[in-house]
Image: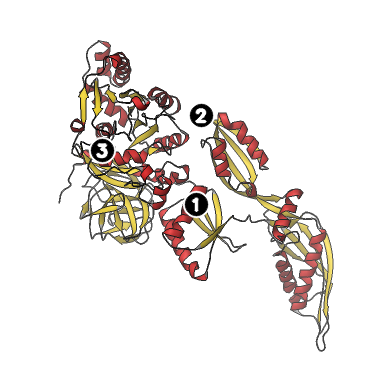
Amino acid sequence: MNRSHPLEKLRNFGIIAHIDAGKTTVSERLLFYTGVSHKIGEVHEGDTVMDWMVQERERGITITAAATTMYWRDHQMNLIDTPGHIDFTAEVQRSLRVLDGAVVVFDGVAGVEPQSETVWRQADKYGTPRVCFINKLDRMGASFEKSYQSILDKLTKNAVAINIPIGEEEHLSAIIDLLEMKALYFEGEKGEKMVEKDLSACVAQAEIPAEYMEKAKQWREKMVDRIAAEDEKLLEKHLGGKEITKEELMATLRKAVLAFKLVPVFCGSALKNKGVQIILDAVVDYLPSPTDIAMTKGTDPKTGAEIERKISDADPFAALVFKVATDPFVGTLTFFRVYSGVLNKGSYVLNSVTGEQERIARILRMHANSRQELDVLYAGEIGATVGLKNTLTGHTLCDKEKPIVLEKISFPEPVISMRVEPKTKADQEKLIMSIRKLIQEDPTFRIKEDIETGETIISGMGELHLDIIQDRLRREFNVDANFGRPQVAYKETVTGEAEAEEKYIRQSGGRGQYGHVLIRIKPKERGAGFEFIDEIKGGAIPKEFIKPTEKGVVEAMDKGIVAGYPMVDIEVTLFDGSFHEVDSSEFAFKIAGSMAFQAAAKRAKPVILEPIMKTEVITPDAFFGIVISDLSSRRGKIEETKDRVGMKVLDASVPLSEMFGYATALRSLTEGRASFTMEFNRYEPVPSNITQEIIEGKRK
């Protein structure tokens, strides 16, 4: 069986944008016009093909990246619709890693929004060629020129308009194609002329209305100047006043897009079905096929040497897993992109990261949440398989004889945690199993057992992220659990020196108990831990009772003096004592050691310690003042500020207890444009006013 479409007729592209710019609506229209779906799904009606999860339909947002395949102008197109919400940024990262090009959608009213900047930077990082679509031009307050200017100002000076609208807001009636210098009218409100193989069948071309002619000429002049500047021969021709053909302009524009030198901008309204077919044409005309990328790099798992693979069916098989999803009907679905070689159903492949072999029992081509069975998958294609045991996101599947590890996908660290406990014993096992499945799917979701509180802590990218996780545990996995606010792991220590003498004497008929110790305690440096020093001279306490005394001290340190938190960083010296020939025992010295430590600790100025987080905040200059004052109100100490292109970077130390809800607070303070990372740094004493609150909280 041969491939249905040659490599140069293959397009892998994604739709990326800020939340609410209309990505899913655009995707739904693309599926409708290419005949994949026979009814247009609407986000506001909750019947979209691409947003198929219950949570997505209820909230009207995209949570997971959905993949689908469609055909246009005899090209096979694999599309991934990605989320726009910052909490699901990992979905965008992983999709961009395996896509060759992207369509960036903008809201015609808002223009470039904060998350548009984030996804644009992610696309820059992966070197993804892209085209822009200014959507929602039928909305009140929409302006093509303002939105276009915001792309030039905030994202790239290389944007070039290829279309302009005729009319705006409710008057949007058609689109002017500056290459053809024709007006394009889209048939019918819902674009009833359906499932056509190219643009001409569902669009009526007409002359540009007289009142728009002058404007169209000005925009065309700008466009020709920009495109001609990318090619010497074309520039000569242009400067010589000769007419440049549409074919020459398109060929030069394609080269410039692939080299990141130009970004074409299109416009329309997906909801009103105006301009959607033009996006399909733009994907075919300007975005890369796998042959334009030519090579993919990897490393040899044994030597670490760099290996290059040609994107062709003839090279050894290599594919990158970019997503693992739990499907209620088929189990674990593993999505991958084939970079080189051919994958046959029933074959064995090597997971070069784990070193284990996996059998490919089925090969599926995905259409959002429905699927088509295949016998073979070729280089450049995106597919899925079922039932792989230990293959996770970022792993490489490859030929056993020619192993390679493709470049992994990097994910941000989680920033927010909460504790979770099952409601009943029966739910315990189910909860852990379900969380494990979710961790396989989502690399930014983590779990850890807090040894000190015995709680299970889950961590994610934001409050919405953890909210969706809770919802999925309840609905998909039927797990009943309680979710709470996470506890800060406080500790205690002493700040002064003190001595104490304790005797443990019990007489109760027959043999008694006798232990007598004198100890001195003093603080150690932060993080230095506990040290026990034996300074007994002349056998005042026999050797066999020294260890039990130390054991008593260690047990006493488990429960602190101030609020019952574990004590750390203390030096304890046993310097004197006495014993009884008959009545002394290990037990008596253990109790005496414990009592002496508690008595000394009370006199040695005990304090509570709290974890301090090293925090970095990256914020646009405009919000610099607000962010600093907010951090100060959280008891944060600003250590350094640096400048980065249009941004300020703040390094601060902030107590962990003050950082709950910070992700949400920062987002609202900065219109979602700032980001932060934090990691544990050190423990520090808590101010006295906060100590009182902690003690009361503990006692309550």
Q: x, y (%) of residue 478?
A: 44, 63
Mark 1, Cα crowd under 10 Å, few <14 / some 14-19 / many 20+, is few
**Secondary structure at numbered mark 2:** loop
Residue 418 sits in quarter: bottom right
Question: Taking 550 as reference, is 21 left or right?
Answer: left
Mark 3 Cα shell of 10 Å, populated few (<14), some (14-19), many (≥20): many
The answer to which of marks 3 and 2 sits earlier in the sequence is: 3
Side (left or right) of 579 relative to 312: right
Tell me the CA gap for discs 3 and 1.
38 Å
Label 3 – label 2 distance at C-alpha: 33 Å
- Kindly give the residue lying farthest to the top in the view shown: 240
Q: CB atoms at circles 2 and 1 under 8 Å apart?
A: no
Badge count: 3
Kind of residue sitting beneath label 1: Asp
Residue 475, horizontal then vertical, whole percent: 43, 59
Q: Which residue corresponds to the image point at 17% horizontal and 45% vertical from the top-left?
A: 4
**Is tag 3's residue or tag 1's residue first in the polypeptide sequence?**
3
Which residue corresponds to the image point at 33% horizontal and 32% vertical from the top-left?
A: 269
The residue carrying mark 1 is 467
Q: Marks 2 and 1, Cα distance to the nearest angstrom?
A: 34 Å
Q: Where is residue 103 drawn, in percent x and y?
A: 34, 35
| Amino acid tagged 2 | Val
Which residue occupies 15% across, 51% down?
1
Q: Percent from the top left, x then y, of residue 580?
A: 83, 81
Q: In this view, does 688 lie to the left or right of 101?
A: right
Element marked by disc 1: helix
Residue nearest the viewer, comparing 116 with 380: 116
Label annotation for residue 645: 2
Name the secondary structure under disc 3.
loop
Q: Name the residue under label 3.
A: 289
In this view, the residue in front, 21 or 683, is: 21
